[in-house]
Amino acid sequence: MTQQAGHSPGIKAAIFDLDGVIFDSAEANVAFYNHLLEVLGLPPMDEASRPVVHSACLDDSLLHLTGDPELVQRAKDYFRSLDPTPFLAKLRTFPHAVETIRSLAERLRLAVATNRMDTTHRALAHVGLTGAFEVVITPNQAGATKPDPRVMAVTLQRLGLERDQVVYIGDSEIDDQLCRAAGVRLVAFRNPSLQAWAHLEDFRDLPPLLGL
């Protein structure tokens, strides 16, 4: 059930994280990074690394896993020639996410701000959400990764909106840090430990939370 700290009627756009919010991508991420580790001749990741690769960008995840900038570069060089299709095929969406977002897109401006990089648009196409988002910001567009507030600044600039006119739906401490740094209200998805403006457990509760 959604809990909120008072609805604001000034919401003009909802900005979404992808992994852990729209994408139930934990297993896909583990498979992807374990493949890169195998290519580098390293063992699979341990359990403690799963939350890191879930929310961090490619560079930070690889550095965490390898501890070696040279290995990070080797993995990135390999990644440029890698067909991501088998890993995208493992992506799932959380219950009611796709239909809720499609419905919201008819009544509210929507955007994405994610640490996912080159596979972002293909991943959205895989789950049937091509065209649902007016703005899609990755580290390539922002010139930074979350939680750097530049990510939110670029997103707001593309939308032509102010920080008090949007909410951000995220699930991780990195998302919380981003919203605090940018002064944007956070809707925490399935993470009650975050000190958010609102908490969301079921996508079907998102439209009423936003006054729709």
Image: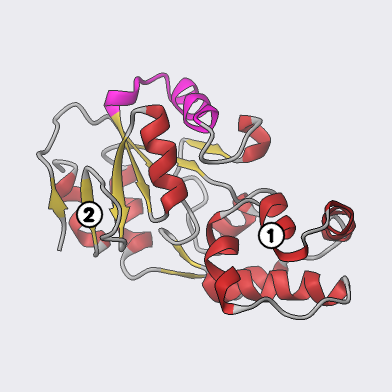
Disc 1 residue type (three-letter): His
Point out the stretch of residues depicted in magenta: 149-165
Residue at point 38%, 68% (across, down): 94
Residue at point 53%, 46% (across, down): 114
Element type where label 2 sits in the image: strand
Residue 199's disc number: 2
Q: Nearer the viewer, residue 159 or 107?
A: 159
Of the numbered discs 2 and 1, the one sitting upstream in the chain is 1
Q: In which quarter of the image is residue 165?
A: top left
Q: Tell me if residue 76 is in the magenta stretch.
A: no
Task: Judge whether 27 appears above or below 106 on screen.
Answer: below
Distance from the alpha carbon under mark 2 to that under mark 1: 29 Å
Disc 2 residue type (three-letter): His
Q: Mark 1 points at which residue?
A: 64
Q: Nearer the viewer, residue 125 or 179?
A: 179
Horizontal and vertical percent position of residue 194: 30, 53
Horizontal and vertical percent position of residue 37: 79, 72
Task: Specify whether 150 is left or right of 75.
Answer: left
Q: Tell me if residue 163 is in the magenta stretch.
A: yes
